Image (spheres, rainbow, N blue to C red):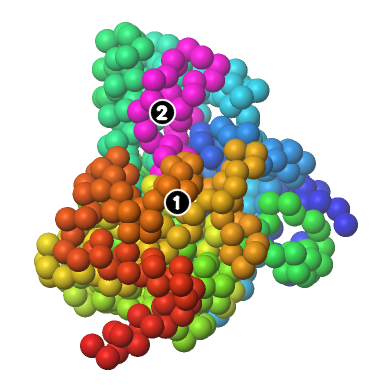
Amino acid sequence: MTYLSPTILQRPHPAVALPETHLLALPEKVLQFGTGVLLRGLPDYLIDKANRQGVFNGRIVVVKSTDGGDINAFTRQSGLYTLGIRGIEDGQQVEENVVCSAISRVLSAKSQWAEVLEFAKSPALQVVISNTTEVGIQLVADDVRKAPPVSFPGKLLAVLYTRWQTFGGDKARGLVIVPTELISDNGSKLEAILLELAHRNELEAEFIDWLETANTCCNSLVDRIVPGRPDAAMQAALEAELGYSDDLLTMSEVYRLWAIEGDENVRNVLSFGQVDKGVIIQPDINLFRELKLRLLNGTHTLSCGLAFLSGFDTVRSAMDDEVLGSFISHLMQDDLRAGIPYPVAEDVSREFGRQVLDRFRNPYIEHRWLGITLNYSAKLQMRAVATLACYAERTRQTPRCAALGFAAYLLFMRGLREQDHTWYGELNGQPYPIQDEKAGYFADLWQRLTPAELTSTVLRNHTLWQQDLTQLPGFADQVTAYLQQMLAQGAYATVASHLNAQVSA
């Protein structure tokens, strides 16, 4: 079977929405840092949708900064990929396949940095998009003159510096920069890091002024479950239906939200926003951010280790189970809703929570819990800690569901062996990867400490949480009790016992 390629676009097929071939010749307007499925399933899809309607009329140059993954698939398929959209929208079942053509080319930062900087000189470039995970937007010592700089902010600063030099400081050549990393005020934090790096690299005062005044770093929020590649059976079935092979085939739910903080100028530059109700550009996006971060992402993060250790591979399979489905619902509606550190009307948060639970039950999406554990520690800090602290302050009680989720995090992080710089835990005799930068730290603690000592040590770790979580009323004792119970009885039995206790209370 042939691979997806531009020649496929000349053979209309009822099973897939193909782009017209002239879209492949649109000018490159966007520089994107990251090749991940979230970017392909939301921003890139939305830009493709706008291009089809003759609105944005621009393609994307993607920068791949990591060594993992295969850049050859993008080259072989000329940046084309199929997005399979599945779910329920407005009460109607949706099954849609779309070949997205927004990606023009993918460049390796490691081996093609000169080409990245050459694109920085393009008059057509208007927008920068990024998704480098939560740990990507951090200030590290970096030299913007390296090829390439080490960090994402360093790479972006080098791009902006090259652009400033090329156009002689012309403020009309500034860019709209929209990071999609899931941290609060991602645009503001990225801008602050860029300015600090510019000073540390002793760049010209005139450039720093241009950096501040000619460019706009927008806070943004993305919300779409994009599991990515389907399992082998579904991949084979889809490719048989489509009539071609696609190494970039990506599955996505129907729901989509891209909330961007910006003014009328931002709205004009990001003209693709007008073609989809899921794109919201307005001066304040805090409500969207808090609801999504605390309820959807917070629930995912506090459930992933527990569900995985209970024997469930996917979110849907856990939701279909009476015990885990009930736990996840109580975690969201009882603990997390009550701790949202932002003024939200109860009916708004409850309805949002209901929608999220429906999305978790989407029969078309195989969202794997193990994938959600990627950067587990950073996600807990970003998505859950403030909620737990606010819950404790408001109620002076222990969020028991959240405590169980936290205990499962500690158990999941029990690394037993290291291989090729990756720590592995074990479940029912089978190894699983712990893809977390703190994996070595936890492996050491598990070797030296009792469960109670480990719990106390981790909760007190200010570096991890930016606060002492042992100060939350009863939280350390409850986490310790659940951890010991899981060690003795297993995760699933502990969840069942927890729910029985909740009912009895």
In the rendered image, residue 310, in percent from the top left (x then y), is placed at 52, 73
On whether residue 167 falls in the magenta region, the answer is no
Q: Quadrant of the N terminus?
A: bottom right
Instruction: Identify the magenta region.
Output: 125-154
Q: Is residue 91 above or below residue 257?
A: below
Mark 2: which amino acid? Answer: Pro
User: Which residue lies at the image location 74% right of the left edge and 38% below the top edge?
Assistant: 72
Quickly name the residue at label 1. 446
- What distance separates the C-alpha of mark 2 from that of mark 1? 35 Å
User: Which residue lies at the image location 32% right of the left edge and 69% below the top edge?
Assistant: 481
Main secondary-structure element of the magenta-colored stretch: loop
Residue 339 position by quadrant: bottom left
Q: Is residue 365 above or below residue 293?
A: below
On the question of residue 147 being in view, the answer is yes
In the rendered image, residue 428, in percent from the top left (x then y), is placed at 62, 68
Camera-side residue of 70 and 245 = 70
Q: Is residue 317 above or below residue 141?
A: below
Label 2 sits on a secondary structure element that is helix
User: Which residue lies at the image location 75% right of the left edge and 54% below the top edge?
Assistant: 246
Mark 1: which amino acid? Answer: Trp
User: Which residue lies at the image location 81% right of the left edge and 51% below the top edge?
Assistant: 3
Q: How many marks?
A: 2
**Horizontal side of residue 440 vs 386, given as left or right:** right
Quickly name the residue at label 2. 153
Q: Quadrant of the C terminus?
A: bottom left
